[in-house]
Image (cartoon, rainbow, N blue to C red):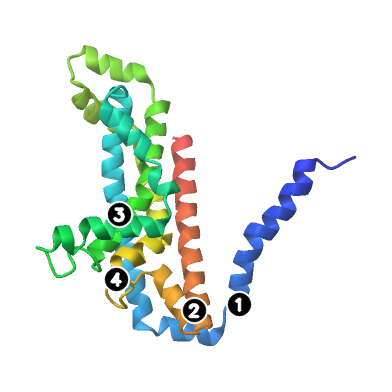
Amino acid sequence: MRKNLIDVVFVPLFLLLVVFPVAALLLNLDGKGIERTLADEMFWRSVVNTIFAALAAALLCTVLAAGFGYYHLFKQHSIVYKVANLLNDLPIALPHTVAGLALLLAFGRKNFGFIGETGLAFTLTAVVLAMFFVSYPLAARAIASGVDRMEREVVDVARTLGDTPAQAYFKVVLPVMGEALFSGFVLAFSRSLSEFAAVVMFGGNLPGSTQVLASYVFTKVEEGELEMAVTASAFCIMLSLLIVALLGLRRLKWRHA
């Protein structure tokens, strides 16, 4: 029996292009590298910075995406929705170095010099904003998809009972959108964890201050500390797998609820 062409093409390419790079990294883990990395205070500070900034960015993404969900449900013909819907995907197509430069010019000392010498740039706030900028589209699309999947009749009933669109959205729509909200949050969080270019351009790469895991790995490669870079990268992979597993388990729970 002939093998399906898709099986013949997909499996080898998947193993080569997805599994092999991850395996190659993990197989290069070194005992001394692990020991030195885990003893490095800057590594743990970068971990804390990464998780804190990613959580803050994901929360901001989810709040703003919930606002977009309202426009997606009730005001698709408004100019606000049309502009927001058009620009939502811009951060995905935009080179992230360009995104970082845009944030630097927008929130740097030129416009926000009253806050400090560099404005918001090169602070942990800048890291959060950079992560938010590149992650928001994922949260917005997740919540918009959740709005599309819900039963519109529930909203219509609320409207016939006298609720305004805003009241119906907060009282009826959001309470039943737990899966979409959670998915949007987790997707934004996981995307924020991996951001590098925009974070470095706007937030800088200041060890112990604005350095995150991605920039820590880059710094160690530049310094020739490949073993430490591999260890930090493996930590990132484990953290990402944990998030993916959490998202999968949560979705499975909702489907069987």
Q: What kind of element bears circle 3? A: helix
* Residue 58 drawn at (x, y percent): 32, 51
Q: Give the residue displayed 17% in from the left and 61% down from the top.
A: 110
Crowdedness near tag 3: few (<14), some (14–19) or many (≥20) residues, C-alpha within 10 Å: many
Q: Is residue 54 left or right of residue 110?
A: right
Split into 4 quadrants, where in the image is the N terminus? top right
Residue 256 position (above or below residue 114): above
**Residue 212 lies in what quarter of the image?**
bottom left
Q: Is residue 46 visible?
A: yes
- Residue under label 4, please give it: 210
Q: State which mark lies toward you, 3 or 2.
A: 2
Crowdedness near tag 1: few (<14), some (14–19) or many (≥20) residues, C-alpha within 10 Å: some
Judge by depth and name the residue closer to the eye, 175 or 90.
Answer: 90
Q: Which mark is residue 221?
A: 2
Q: Which mark is residue 28?
A: 1
Q: Which mark is residue 100?
A: none
Q: Amino acid at mark 3?
A: Ala
Q: Earlier in the sequence, mark 2 or mark 4?
A: 4
Q: Distance of mark 4 from mark 3, alpha carbons? A: 14 Å
- Residue under label 3, please give it: 57
Judge by depth and name the residue closer to the eye, 246 or 143.
Answer: 143
Q: Amino acid at mark 2?
A: Val
Q: Amino acid at mark 4?
A: Thr
Q: Earlier in the sequence, mark 1 or mark 4?
A: 1
* Residue 56 drawn at (x, y percent): 27, 56
Q: Earlier in the sequence, mark 4 or mark 3?
A: 3
Q: State which mark lies toward you, 4 or 3.
A: 4
